[in-house]
């Protein structure tokens, strides 16, 4: 079925966009991630990628023409599909979304000022409406932008500018955690940062007041009051007076925390080497208290080794139970990890932390998968003796170290070409059998799980696969992945063998029909040529969506994977 693409709001003050250039013609095939067009906004020219697959059936404007936000930009569907009804539905700028004043019915055009005001609250509340001041039109105001197609709110991962700092166009203001990734937000204004709408870790709804950039002397109270009058912006009280001293009730708590823990030296996103992160986790060191000695303050192994956390005083626990509820919520971020073990024996103690946007998305998608897709599981043991021997020989000549996971990925890619039923997706009223092989590799990060995609894996050699997997894993841990990096998988692999897990079952990653769970390689007694000898055995479990894949199809696929790993030279042909 054809889908309409509306002109998105690509900046906080954008009301219309100009088509700088189309990169697809009517009739062209479009894939997810393909560049559709370049859109010139009031601030910059930005690239617009497609989130749909199909054929471009209609373009709402030609190069150089303007479209209002939420006007019909394009239609993507099946080749030859009739889209006249969809074009008619969105003709005249009426798109059925009451988010913008220009979408008001034509009969109300005689009184545009009156028509615009009641329309705004139906979608995203326009800040400041109830007070008679529309802050979205103020030059100094920066609203929370929509940084992904499904984003409704953002979490401040960290501010890169403090109140009073000079800001230039292009400077990174803050890092915003969306439901898909942590992204850098650049400033489109020059001036001073006069106000921050939330502290690190707090949420802001899309189009709520994010910050104020202007010249000193600006009446901030009026703007903030206008925002609160028309939107649910959560503005921390301390922002109105950043240099003010703590109230008498707060001072005992702050003094105790300073005596109990080192000063916080890293706010928001923390840069550290993978080895430093691993050692810190083993030692229970919170990286926010460690000063980095590397480039740009990057934390190194030596910084963790030399870090010493002062012993927490006995009175620390009872003093921290005294603050108001709002301060208790911030307790996990204010107390270093080593102090968590200071709770008295027999005393009930726990920490509560807000659910991150990424964790929310993971929970929702996996719950939908588990309770809508009828899972069944197939487990098989694979003799890895030959794979162990061949991997050692391959690493003698490969520029990139090849792991067993890379070998499994290659074997799976080859097997999927032979078993297209496994390389498929359930689409409700139809099943898609993919001819290309894009394998998602589950990568664990602090906030949850990301699945970057190795595209066209069946056409790539082991060294190339190894290099891509390592690059994706590092970028995932550094929060540098973009939406295009994890979209478009046709099959997924999850490996817990490096954690000593023998076997497990995994939940299918929609829209894939299957996921392969890989356990560790264990040395166990095996029978070969009538004799019991030591052998290297790895167990794998295939989770299948029974709506798409039957037991026999899944079993045949596993047999092919088994034969390729037991004779690795076969998958190199």
Image (tube, grey):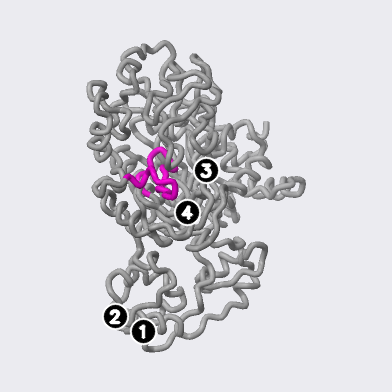
Q: Nearer the viewer, residue 450 or 397?
A: 450
- Separation of disc 1 and disc 4 at Cα? 36 Å
Task: Write the residue at 56% across / 72% down.
Answer: 290
- Separation of disc 2 and disc 4 at Cα? 39 Å
Screen quadrant of the N terminus: top left
Describe the element under mark 4 as helix, strand or loop: strand
Which circle's residue, 1 or 4, is located before the other in the chain?
4
| Residue 538 rendering spot, x and y as whole percentages | 53, 50
Describe the element under mark 1 as helix, strand or loop: helix
Marks 1 and 2 in Cβ contact (< 8 Å): yes
| Residue 411 rendering spot, x and y as whole percentages | 58, 37
Which circle's residue, 3 or 1, is located before the other in the chain?
1
- Of circles 1 and 4, the one toward us is 4
- Bin the neighbour count of mark 1 within 10 Å (Cα to Cα): few under 14, some 14-19, many 20 and up: some
Marks 3 and 1 in Cβ contact (< 8 Å): no
Splitting the image into 4 quarters, where does residue 318 fall? bottom left
Which circle's residue, 2 or 3, is located before the other in the chain?
2
- Of circles 3 and 4, the one toward us is 4
| Residue 311 rendering spot, x and y as whole percentages | 48, 85
- Separation of disc 3 and disc 1 at Cα? 44 Å
What residue sits right under mark 4 in the picture? 214
- Kindly tell me whether residue 191 is visible in this rendering: yes
Which circle's residue, 3 or 4, is located before the other in the chain?
4
Q: Which mark is residue 482?
A: 3
């Amino acid at each position: 079925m054809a889908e309409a693409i509306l002109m998105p709001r690509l900046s906080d003050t954008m009301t219309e966009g100009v088509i700088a250039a189309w990169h697809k013609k009517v009739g062209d095939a479009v894939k997810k991630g393909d560049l559709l067009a370049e859109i010139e906004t009031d601030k910059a020219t930005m690239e617009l990628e497609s989130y749909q697959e199909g054929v471009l059936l209609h373009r709402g404007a030609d190069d150089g023409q303007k479209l209002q936000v939420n006007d019909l930009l394009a239609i993507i569907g099946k080749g030859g599909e009739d889209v006249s009804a969809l074009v008619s539905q969105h003709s005249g700028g009426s798109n059925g979304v009451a988010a913008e004043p220009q979408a008001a019915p034509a009969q109300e055009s005689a009184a545009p000022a009156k028509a615009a005001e009641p329309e705004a609250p139906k979608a995203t509340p326009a800040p400041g409406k109830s007070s008679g001041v529309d802050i979205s039109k103020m030059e100094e105001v920066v609203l929370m932008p929509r940084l992904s197609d499904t984003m409704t709110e953002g979490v401040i991962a960290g501010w890169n500018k403090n109140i009073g700092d000079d800001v230039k166009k292009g400077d990174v203001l803050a890092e915003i955690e969306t439901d898909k990734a942590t992204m850098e937000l650049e400033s489109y204004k020059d001036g001073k940062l006069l106000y921050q709408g939330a502290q690190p870790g707090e949420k802001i709804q899309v189009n709520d007041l994010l910050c104020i950039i202007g010249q000193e002397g600006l009446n901030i109270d009026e703007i903030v009051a206008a925002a609160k009058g028309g939107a649910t912006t959560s503005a921390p009280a301390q922002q109105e007076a950043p240099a003010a001293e703590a109230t008498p009730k707060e001072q005992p708590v702050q003094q105790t925390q300073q005596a109990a823990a080192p000063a916080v030296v890293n706010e928001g996103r923390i840069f550290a080497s993978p080895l430093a992160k691993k050692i810190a986790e083993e030692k229970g060191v919170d990286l926010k208290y460690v000063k980095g000695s590397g480039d740009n303050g990057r934390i190194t192994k030596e910084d963790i080794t030399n870090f010493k956390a002062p012993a927490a005083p006995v009175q620390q626990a009872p003093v921290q139970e005294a603050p108001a509820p709002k301060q208790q919520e911030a307790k996990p971020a204010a107390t270093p990890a080593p102090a968590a073990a200071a709770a008295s024996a027999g005393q009930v103690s726990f920490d509560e932390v807000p659910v991150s946007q990424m964790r929310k998305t993971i929970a929702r998608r996996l719950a939908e998968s588990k309770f809508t897709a009828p899972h069944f599981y197939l487990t098989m043991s694979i003799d890895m003796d030959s794979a162990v021997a061949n991997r050692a020989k391959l690493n003698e000549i490969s520029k990139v170290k090849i792991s067993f996971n890379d070998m499994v990925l290659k074997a799976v890619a080859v097997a999927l070409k032979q078993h297209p039923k496994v390389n498929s997706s359930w689409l409700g009223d139809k099943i898609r059998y993919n001819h290309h092989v894009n394998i998602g590799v589950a990568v664990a990060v602090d906030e949850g799980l990301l699945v970057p995609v190795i595209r066209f894996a069946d056409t790539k050699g082991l060294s190339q696969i190894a290099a891509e997997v390592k690059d994706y894993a590092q970028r995932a841990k550094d929060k540098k992945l973009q939406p295009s990096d994890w979209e478009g998988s046709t099959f997924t692999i999850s490996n817990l063998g490096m954690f000593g897990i023998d076997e497990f079952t995994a939940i299918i990653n929609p829209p894939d029909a299957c996921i392969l769970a890989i356990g560790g390689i264990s040395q166990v007694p095996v029978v070969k040529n009538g004799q019991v000898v030591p052998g290297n055995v790895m167990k794998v479990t295939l989770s299948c969506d029974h709506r798409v894949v039957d037991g026999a199809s899944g079993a045949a696929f596993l047999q092919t994977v088994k034969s390729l790993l037991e004779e690795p030279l076969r998958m190199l042909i």
